Amino acid sequence: MKVFLDLMWYFKQEKKAYLTGIALLMFVALLQLVPPKVIGIIVDLIRTETITKASLLKYVSFLILAGLTMYVLRYYWRIMIFGSSVKLSKQLRNKLYEHFTSMSQSFYQKKRVGDLMAHATNDISAVQQTAGAGVLTFVDSLATGGFVIIAMAFTISWKLTLIALIPLPLMAVLTNWYGTLLHKRFHKAQEAFSSLNDKTQESITGIKVIKTFGQEMEDIEDFEKLSEDVVQKNISVAKVDSLFDPTISIIVGISFFLSLSFGAKFVINGELTIGQLVSFTSYLGLLIWPMLAFGWLFNIVERGRASYDRINNLLMEKIEMPDSQNALNKVPTGDIEYALESFIYPKETEPVLKDIFFALKRGQTLGIVGKTGAGKTTLLKLLIREFDGYKGEIYFGGNPLESYKMESLREAIGYVPQDHFLFSASIAENIAFSNPFVSQEVIEAAATTAHIHQDILQFTEGYGTLVGERGVSLSGGQKQRISIARAILMDAEVLVLDDSLSAVDAQTEEKILKALKENRVDKTTIITAHRLSAIQHANLILVLDEGRITERGSHLELMELDGWYKEMYERQQLEELVEHGG
Amino acid sequence: MMQKNQVLNGREQRKVLFRLLSYTKPHSKKIIFAFSLLLITTVVDILGPILVKIFIDDYLTPRNLIFKPLFILGAAYMGLQITNVIVSYLQLLKFQEIALKIIQQLRIDVFTKVHSLGLKYFDKTPAGSIVSRVTNDTEAIKDMFVTVIATFIQSAFLLTGIFIAMFVLNVKLALFCTFILPVIFLIMTAYRKYSSRFYQDLRERLSQLNAKLSESLQGMAIIQVFRQEKRLRNEFGKINEEHYQAGMKNIKVDGLLLRPAVDLVFVAALIIVLSFFGISSFESPVEIGVLYAFINYLDRFFEPVNNMMMRLSLYQQAIVAGSRVFTLLDEDELAPNQENDSVLNIESGKIEVKNVSFSYDGKRDVLKNISFTAEPGQTVALVGHTGSGKSSIINLLMRFYEFDRGDILIDGDSIKSYNKIELRDKMGLVLQDPFLFYGTIADNIRLHSEGISDSQIESAAQFVQANTFIDKLDERYQHKVVERGATLSSGQRQLIAFARTIAANPKILVLDEATANIDTETEEAIQTALERMRKGRTTIAIAHRLSTIQDADLILVMHQGEIVERGTHQELLAQKGLYHKMFLLQNGSVVRTENAVS
């Protein structure tokens, strides 16, 4: 029940809705007492032959009134209580989303997207259950249960009430026990299902091997075995699941039997009328739900608490790179200088960058090359402050990076990441990602510079073509160029291309580089690449190896050096020849 | 993969339902048994109130309490209750069992179907969505069989039983009570109409919400670097708000038409029964017991109604899932046909490729008029740049794709005229990416061929020199392969794949050499293994490292779907063409490279 305390802030926030809802619920619980009472009264009137048209009409009107009121109230408490619970889930979801957007990349490095999704879906829905069905079962089992027992004890017979109630706690105990049992078996059934899922996944990804060895039949047999296991595990669930209804019915049956036998005795003694006995049995029927609800309540609350704790832990994660109080609120411009002693990724021990010292004048182009894993991307990520915590300093326009507001710093950098991630939206929306309000001309200009305009016009919907799972499937090169256009559209002080030309051919690469040069006068460009032609014309080229700068200079200087750069350059020339069929 | 919510019209829905129901046929005996159990529990259920009625009217009202008949009555009542518990437990269990068996059959059918499909189907369908058809969609159908159909049948039985009992007790009142049926029917229709629409809407919003969330999480780096956090928050907030509104609509529909409405009908029915008895009692005395029984029946009448209504949404989902499953079952992108009653045998393993042209999409040819011959025991190597068509040749040789221009002959007969088993037995493929299955090393070498003994596995491993590293693993051949073999090096995985092929002992070997950098320790082992494997087998090999195929009998250099150079290593080097450049690229020193460029 602690989770109700944890959620108190929300109950307070939605005080009106919850108080109204609970009041309505309790009122409904009271009104529910009317029909059994009326039945009893009418039975007695009929039996004693004292019934008149007027009295019949009176009681029937009571019923009509009670029925209609209950209908209306039941509708409204649902809106109040269930409505509030849905609102809570909305609120939590927004909060989580907001939190996600302000977490730095080191957070995403240690968390898996799948887990975060689970928190935002399953956990939120468990909390919603608690704030809705949890509150309902709590209030309703107490209110309905309490009122019915009071009505039975005080208006009919407390002795008979005690007798009739004897078997009922057993129902709460048994159903609760079944619940635990069911949970365990259900878990096993889930496991069996997920191994069936894994098996299917494996068969489909390994379909070539299976076909090669002609083992389709055997694989199917294997699948049959696993699916048999799923059936068996589910049957063991069914064995418990099927206990619920019969158990409830036998316990209620016993309770009925006791009420009727003892009730009959009381009727003969004159302690009770037959009408009262009939009312009594009807009340007994009303007690089933609160008993079940009580058992159910514990499950809901237990799940809700665990989920709420998980969500809270997530929300408690601190934002790692808050802006300092006197952070500069201007977009940086000017020279870039790295004076970096070393950088180690969080939770790792080996530095990925060591002794990186270089300066880049405003308007110059920097090229960074080196093997995979040499630290090229990391070097760029530090500039956009995806990570900090390095030894040394990086200056932009004369000031250290962290002296700028994050917002301002990033406004100065157009970034094209290695993995060209596009959103499920139209091509135009993807290109105008940094500013959805720009005109179509601006979008097309960016696309033209990135040499993707012609490709886009080829699509049936042109710039309105949807990208992503439900849209057109783009080639790697097309995706790269769209993501280049997205960065170009920002017209930022610095453009960063992280191996972003790998999937376009050499001619297109040349055209893009030329267009960039023409359109970005006096603006800085940083390019990392595997293909050296992409950085050949850079003012400064750095060769990285295992996090250190091993060679530096212009293309000509590096060729003179006769080192890794030169060897690579010549290899690539030959490769290009081979690619074109000699 | 996310599925777009399909909308099926009534006729299509019924078609899917009937096709699903046809799966019950093999279980007709069990179903009849379950129905008989259901019939018993229903009768027992109905008899209870009648006993109470007898008790009230014959004994309690006249205050005629004689021990013996009352004892019998009481015993009968409790006896019925106990019978009911046992029979209804069995009945509930039986229905679930049948449902589970039905789903198992459906699952096996789908899985079997998947295996009969050609690789073309797998190219155009994401693996995730096929898996979803086999497991998740059938699971949704299971929910329908277990809860919806079972609940509907059980409810229908009970409702019929209640009405029969009512008619037996009092025809006139029972007739009055039939008013419930059209009213309930109306509520159900209205509920189905609105709730299915609103519920669908809610689900759609939820999947939008989740899609947005998952996409944002994946693209968070981009969102942040482009400073779009605020905009995305607003966009998410908007979808979230729409989802909330859809949720509220559902609460309202449920509130208007579900339990509260059914409870209102209950009160109305109560009023009818009470008025009827009240009014009749003006003229003649009435039996209180009958009144009791009627009220009791009404009490029971509405629980199944509520149950049925709450499960309508499951039904809708199951039908949509069913239609997706049947679409897969009806898929006709089948694997290429073989003449399965053919008795042709591959004896020597001569391969002739004659004028083969091939296209995946029917537009662009990836193979253009390819011809070559591999004599028995010879090695033919295919080299060329990515996309030159090497892999396509292997795809055709392995019959992964159907082709219709030109022919491939094995021992003089078309590859299409061999039966499937013969082809799979005599042709072995070693894939570039050695796929390892969950299980032990031995399982991965044996695969499902139970005929391969442990010693055969060990000698196969020895043959390809995989034994050296396997012996060092704990539990050796029983070592568990986890996460697709991520704990093994790529070279070690390759060797296991070799052993797998050697254990199957094919006549013809098709090799797709790994491009990935193989660790130096295993590199040598792999080279020796390849040499030994090729001995005595006709081999078609894709080579990325020219060093591995220098002794090939024939090297084909491919470029854009055509064979541009052919000959032995020495002949090709002498030609100073494409092959020569490739060779230099891989082996040449800087100086020689410079020469080639200039």
Image: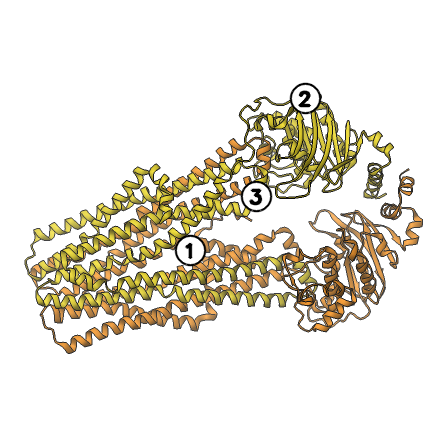
Chain colours: A yellow, B orange
Tags 3 and 1 on a common chain: no
> Is B201 or A497 nearer to us in this picture?
A497
Residue drawn at point x = 66 percent, y = 33 percent:
A391
> Which numbered mark, 3 or 2, is in the foreground of this view?
2
Residue drawn at point x = 37 percent, y = 39 percent:
A9
> Is B258 or A301 nearer to us in this picture?
A301
* Residues tagged 3 and 1 counted as in contact (Cβ below 8 A): no
Q: CA distance from mark 2 to mark 1?
A: 65 Å
> Which numbered mark, 2 or 1, is in the foreground of this view?
2
Left or right, residue A166 beside residue A410: left
| Quadrant of res A13 | top left
Q: CA distance from mark 3 to mark 1?
A: 26 Å
Query: Label 2 is placed on what type of residue?
Result: Gly
Q: Position of residue B253 (x, y in %)?
A: 34, 45
Local packing at callout 1 (Cα closer than 10 Å; few below 14, some 14-19, many 20+) is: many
Q: Position of residue B317 (x, y in %)?
A: 45, 53
Circle 1 chain: B
Q: Note whether B193 is above or below B98 in the view shown.
A: above
Of helix, strand and loop, which one carries label 1?
Answer: helix
Left or right, residue B121 beside residue B171: right
Q: Position of residue B488 (x, y in %)?
A: 70, 57
Of helix, strand and loop, which one carries label 2?
Answer: loop
Q: Which mark is residue A334?
A: 2
Residue linked to disc 1: B315
Q: CA distance from mark 3 to mark 2?
A: 42 Å
Circle 3 chain: A
